[in-house]
Image (cartoon, helix red, strand yellow):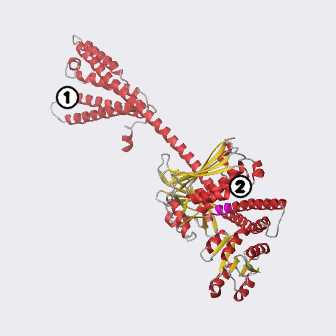
Amino acid sequence: MSSPYALVIEDDPDLSDIFSEALGVAGFEVEVIRDGQVALQRLPSVEAVVIVLDIHLPNVSGDILLEHIQADERFANTRVIVTTADTVIAEMLRDKADIVLVKPISFGQLRDLASRLRPAD
Amino acid sequence: MKAFLNLFQIVPSQNPDDNRRRSLLNIFLVGLMAIALILVVLILFSLGLEGVVIDELLFLLVLTAVFFLLAFGIALLNHYRPGSLPAWFFLLLLLTAISFSDTPQEVVDGRSIYLFTLPILIASFVLFPLASFAFAGLSSLAILILTFYGDLGLVNLIGMVGFFAIAFVAWLASNNMETALRDLRALNRELDRRVEDRTRELAEALAREVVEAGKNQAILEGIADGVIVFDANQTMIVANPSVCRLLEMGRADLLGKTIGQFSELPLLSKEDSQKMQGWLARPNETLLSGRLLWGQKTLSVTTAAVTTPVGMPIGTVAVFRDFTKEAEVEQMKNTFVAIVSHELRTPLNAILAYSEMLQGEVYGPINPKQANAATRIYSNAQRLLGMVSDLLDQARLEAGKLKIEVAEFQVLELADAVQGVMEKSARDKGLDLKIVVEPDAPVAVWGDSHRCQQILINLVNNAVKFTEAGEVGVRIRKAGDRHWAIHVSDTGPGIPEKALPYIFETFRQVDGVTTRQHGGVGLGLSIVKRLVELMGGTVSVSSQVKQGTTFVVTLPVKPSGTNNEEIKS
C-alpha cells in the first residue's frame, strides 16, 4: 500500500522544506505548494490525508483556501493543520480549523503530530 | 427776602466749634430781634391808648429800634466773621438791656433779677464754658453799680452767689457737652479714617485683581493647550483660543454648553462621548486623563475638579492637547515592532527547526562536536525568539491590544507546565528548581493560564539566569480569601536597594553589564508587571544583596466582574 498523501502549502522555502521533512519522517508522501493561487488550482485534483496550511500566502490567502477545503466533500476526512506566526489570527481560526499551530513550529512537534494523524496501515 | 434770610445763615469756617457757636448765636439774635419787633408793635398800639405819656413811649420806641438795629448789626458781623467777637457784643448788649429793663429796685432785688441768668447760660454755650463765670461776674458788677447809683442799701449778695451757682451749672453742662462733642468728632474722624483706609485697600485690591486677571487671561489666551472650564452647574464658562482651534469650533458655540451637550458633539464617537462625559462630570482630586478621537484628531484630555480652598467642588477644568502626531508615531512604532517581530519569527523558526533536525540526526549521524554546535545554535535561536516575543508583547501591551483570556484552570497544571519548561535550564546550570504548591493553595483559579505561565516562566527564567549556585524556589499559596500568591525566590546576587524601584520599568537591567552576560532586552519584568496588572493583581519584590531575591505575584482567585468573558486591556 502506498504512503498516505500530505499537502504542505507554505511560501517560505525553508519552512516548507522542514514541514515536508517532518511529514516525510512521519511516513507521508508530501507535495509542497508555495503559492495560494497554485494551491487553489491544485486542490480539486488532490486527495490528501493531512494539509499543512500557512495563512500568509502570495496571491490567495490561507483562510480562503481553508474555506474551499472545508466546503469540499472530498476533504471531509482530511485534517488541516493551520500554521501562522500571528497569535491573534491563531485565536480567530481556533474554531474553524482542526489544528492551529503558532510559529515557531518545531520539527519534532509537527513530526509527532503527523504520526498520530497517519491512518493505521 | 431770601437774600435777607440768608444773612442769618453763617458763612462756615474751618473750626466746627466756631460754626456751632455762631449758629446758636444767630438763633438768639433772631429771637432778640423778634422780641424787639413785638415791642415796637406793642408801643405803636399803645400810642392810641388814653392816659399814656407819649414822650416816654417815643423814647422807648427809639430805644427799641436802636436795640433792634444793634442786634441786626451783630447778626451781620456774625454772618461774615468767624470768632467770638459778635458773641461778646451780643452778650454785652443783652446784659445792658437787662440792666435797664426794669426799675433798679426790681432788677437788683426783684422780679427782673432772674433775667441775668440768660447771659450767664448763653455765654457758656456761645463763647466757651468758663465764660459763664465771666458773665456771672459782670452781672454781679451790674447789680453793684445799680445798687450804688440807685442808693438801694444792702448789696444783694445772695443773688450774686446764685449767679455763680448758675454759672457753675452752665459751665458743667456746657463743658460736658463740649467733651461729648469732641469725643464724637474724634470717633467720626476715626470712622472717616477707617472708611478711607478700607476704600483705598479696596481700590488697591481691585487694581491688583484687574492686573492678576489680566495676567491669567493673557496666559489662558496664550498657551498652546486648550482649556475649558465648567462651573458648578456644568455650564462652560471658559474656552480659550487654543481649544477653539483644537476643536475647530467658535468660542461662542462652546460657551454656555453643558457637559452633556459638549460630550454629545458629533465629532466624538459614542464610546468617546461617554468617556468624555465621565471625565468631566465626575472629576475628583486626582487628575483624570486619557485620549479620544475628535474627528481626524487624537486629543489627550486631562480633567480635574476646581475646588475652593476648603475643598468644595465648584466646577471642572479640562485641558486638551493635540496628540495626533504622537499617536501616529506611536502607532507606527507599534506596527513596526509587530511587523519586525513577526517577520523575525519565520527565519528563527527555520533556524530552530534545522538545528533540531541536525540534533535529531534526521540527515544522518553527526559527531559529538557537531551535535554540540547544533545544540548551541538551537539554544541561541531560542533566546533570540524569547526576545522577539517580549518585544511583540511589549508592543501589544503599549498598543492596548494584548488580550487576557479568562478561564478556569488548575494550579497544579500551571506548576507542572513551569516545571516542564524550566527544569532543563535550571539543571544545566546546576541549580535546584523546587516548585511547591502549599496545601492551602486554591485547586482551581480563574485567569489566563497562558499568561500566568508566561509570568511564571519569565520570573523563573530570570531567577535561573542570575543565580550561579543554590536553588530557585517557586511557592504557590493562598493569600487571603480572594487571592492567591506565587513566590519566586532565588539565591542569586540580589538587587541593590537603589535599583529596586526601577526594575519593573521598560528596558531596564540592574546594570549594563548584565545585559551582555545574561541576555534579554530588559523587557521581562516590565511585561510581567503589565500582565499581572491586566489580570487585576500586583507584583512586588524584596531583595538582599548577596542573599537573593524574592518576587511575589498576587492574583485574584476570580477576577471581579468577569465570568468567562474576555478582558480587553
Viewer-proximal residue, B62 or A49? A49
Q: Which mark is residue B132?
A: none
Answer whether residue B525 is visible to the viewer in this image: no
What subunit carries mark 1? Answer: B
Q: Main secondary structure of the magenta part?
A: helix
Q: Which quadrant, please, contains the N terminus of chain B?
A: top left
Q: Secondary structure at mark 1?
A: loop
How far apart, in angstroms, are the residues tagged by discs 1 and 2? 156 Å
Q: Is residue B246 left or right of residue B229?
A: right
Q: Which quadrant, please, contains the C terminus of chain B?
A: bottom right
Answer whether residue A90 is visible to the viewer in this image: yes
Viewer-proximal residue, B344 or B323? B344
Residue B139: % across, % down: 30, 19
Residue A87: % across, % down: 66, 68
Magenta region, residue range: B393-401
Q: Secondary structure at mark 2?
A: helix
Viewer-proximal residue, A21 or B345? A21
Q: Is residue B95 left or right of residue B524?
A: left
Q: Residue at x 57, y 69 (%)?
A: B268
Dot 1 amino acid type: Val
Q: Which residue is mark 2?
A: B425
Q: Which mark is residue B53?
A: 1
Q: Are marks 1 and 2 on the same chain?
A: yes
Residue B558: % across, % down: 51, 59
Dot 2 amino acid type: Ser
Q: Quadrant of residue B143?
A: top left
What subunit carries mark 2? Answer: B
Q: Residues within 10 Å of mark 1 (few under 14, many from 20)?
A: few
